Amino acid sequence: MNGVIAGITYRALLGRRRVWLLVLLPAVLLALAVLLRVIGADGERATVELLRTFAIGVMLPLLGVIAGTGVIAPEIDDGTIVHLLSKPISRPVIAQTKFLVAASVVAAFATVPTFAAAYLLIGLEAGVASGFALAALVGGVAYAAVFMLLGVVTRHAVTIGIIYAVIWEGVVGNFVPGARRYSVQQWAQTVADQVSSSAFLTTDIGIGFAVSALVVVSVGAVLWAGRRLRSFSLTGDE
Amino acid sequence: MNIELAQVSRWYGNVVAVNDVTMTIGPGVTGLLGPNGAGKSTLLHMMAGFLAPSGGTVTLDGTRIWRNHEVYRSIGLVPEREAVYGFLTGWQFVLSSARLHRLPDPEDAARKALALVEMEDAADRRIETYSKGMRQRMKVAAALVHEPRVLLLDEPFNGMDPRQRMHMMDLIRAMGTAGKTILFSSHILEEVERVAQHIEVLVAGRHAASGDFREIRRRMTDRPHLFRVRSSDDRRLAAALIADASSGAVSLTEAGLEVRAVDFRRFTWLLPRVARDAGVRVWQVSPADEDLESVFSYLINRSG
């Protein structure tokens, strides 16, 4: 962790337009919660469905894409990363710092609104609010790591990230049973299920597998990103 | 400190960008000269640790540069691309550089670096409000903040106005005199001439010439020159010119005469006299190969 790099990265990520992208999705989640409340559909089942499909299924991966790629991909694109890389700082430390910034941003923008939306609908009933908040936290951390890695290895990180979030996580992960074992949001839901006693939330992955998978993916992605940064090349315009 | 390149090559797929280059960059100012696309940036990126050589070694006083972040204690790099963090002020940018180097007194180091490039007045403005030349100077300040013994600059004068250019040239010269190892790339002969004591010429990825500026300049003027001459009687003039040893070859074309002068000075002295004696009126004399590319290609053919 390097404070100077973290400071610059926070400013780049939260400065100006990008912060509105980060605010937009949590705002939609809270608006949907308010709407459900207003029309009186604020039971435990509706709450779980909202959090499962929108908070964890849509908001979390997209926040992951925005923050995870946002901490590094634009700098690689325009060459400003050279300012950080041409310093006597080990590249894995730079990758870890970028990851911590992305993870903290996803955690803040996902965890709090998720908890708030659940609380607004059913209070603390059946541990749904805390379960999904924890799921958003661990899932957000994993997404931050994966999408930061994507930002390091490819120039099309945002496109690939969104396709991954929509196709794999959204469609395949939800409907193809075998693929569920390899989906961040399914692991996150397993964590939520572990905390919450709600009968409307069921998952078919073991908690041991889900937690190990989250840890392996997060740590592995950060280490790999550090390795790739060590070999970062400027190819020039020639 | 010395940067040593030993039989360095770099290729991208089937394309060879740098081909078997061996050179040593020592203290003082060295200009890396070559036309666009000659592989200057590729070579400079390898010296800066931002590209792996496909073959050969690039070292700084014997230490490998690639994948070694410790070299940045001694190396300052000014990349060609002008992008910098636009949301930072100049002061914040240079200070961040000092902090990333973990200097004992980063504020003091940043102040000195800003003074060196004469950017104190604009230091509190955001970099996005700067002109291209100002950004360039801020990048130089950030690269100099830890007083590196080696400074690498990729096309440093691009986008600067004449006054800024002059100032940057003075700064580079002064640092070279102070014993720093400075290498800058340029495709403009005049820039290199005014700043560098030593020149390395790169053409089509190959190391074409190396040495003192005057030596290279002499070789550039002593090379065979190609002239296109139009006159009232091309055939008669051709006969008169070929009789003298200063003309290597003369050919008659639709557009006039093409004369290859092997002795530049004698030829320019001779032409008007020969024409007068032969009673031929000369209408036009123009160099047919005066562009830098042809100078470079001559140098590479000669050394290769």
Image (spheres, rainbow, N blue to C red):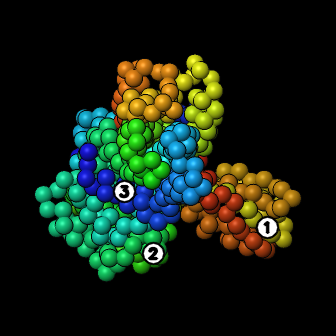
The quadrant of the rendering that contains the N terminus of chain A is: top left
Amino acid type, callout 1: Arg
Q: Which amino acid, mark 3?
A: Tyr
| Along the viewing direction, whichever of B255 and A49 lies nearer the viewer | A49
| Residue highlighted by disc 2 | B129
Residue displayed at 26% across by 64% down:
B95
Residue B250: name its quadrant. Answer: bottom right
- Quadrant of the rendered image containing residue B30: bottom left
Q: Around disc 3, counting alpha carbons within 10 Å, would you say few (fewer than 14), some (14 to 19), or many (20 or more)?
A: some
Near mark 1 (Cα within 10 A), the count class, few <14, some 14-19 or many ≥20, is some
Q: Circle 1 sits on which residue?
A: B230
Q: Residues within 10 Å of mark 2 (few under 14, many from 20)?
A: few
Q: CA distance from mark 1 to mark 2?
A: 53 Å
User: Which residue type does callout 2 highlight?
Assistant: Thr
Residue B202 appears in the rendering? no
The label on residue A10 is: 3
Residue under the image location 38 percent in, 38 percent down: A127
- The residue furthest right is B254
Which residue does the image show at 16% across and 68% down from the upper left?
A: B108
